[in-house]
Amino acid sequence: MMDGLITGRLTGVPESRVDRNRRPYMVARMRANAGDGSSIPVNIVAFDNAPCAVLRSLSEGDAIALRGSFTPKVWIDRQDESHAVLDVVAQQVLAAPSMSDL
């Protein structure tokens, strides 16, 4: 696990969930651009109130920046090709408003 900052765009609507102890948290997905023109899927989870509130206000396609703990992973698709993915526990979420909000 490592700490870092990453930017990208949401690929779906963030979801509110509740853990088995009835504490709320948020999950979301985004894609971050890599330096070679490809993109990396990022799985986001947030437990603190501030990042959860920001995620709750966002929708698909919104630009965001995350600060948090990153865990790089690899998944293998059905054709046995490996792909990089990041899991992020977000401590801070910054968001740019979409053009329709301006």
Image (cartoon, grey):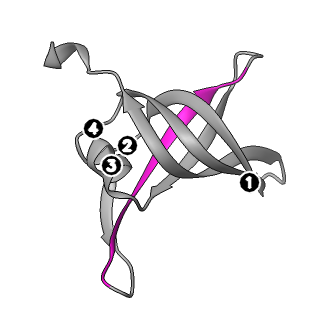
The answer to the question of whether label 2 and label 4 lie on touching residues, with beta carbons closer than 8 A, is no
Q: Main secondary structure of the magenta part?
A: strand
Quarter of the image with the N terminus is bottom right
Instruction: Name which residue lies at 74% across and 54% down.
Output: 77
Q: Is residue 37 left or right of residue 59?
A: right
Q: Earlier in the sequence, mark 3 or mark 1?
A: 3
In the picture of the structure, the residue carrying the numbered disc 2 is 12
Whether residue 102 is in magenta: the answer is no
Image quarter of residue 9: top left
Of marks 3 and 4, the one in the foreground: 3
Q: Earlier in the sequence, mark 2 or mark 1?
A: 2
Q: Is residue 76 left or right of residue 56?
A: right
Real-space Cα separation, disc 1 to disc 4, in angstroms: 29 Å
Picture disc at residue 58: 4
Residue 24 appears at what percent x and percent y?
31, 70
Question: Which contiguous range is marked in magenta?
Answer: 22-34
Quarter of the image with the C terminus is top left
Picture disc at residue 50: 3
In the picture of the structure, the residue carrying the numbered disc 1 is 77
Does residue 47 sit above or below 67 in this rendering? below
Q: Earlier in the sequence, mark 3 or mark 4?
A: 3
Q: Amino acid at mark 2?
A: Gly
Name the foreground residue: 52 vs 30.
52
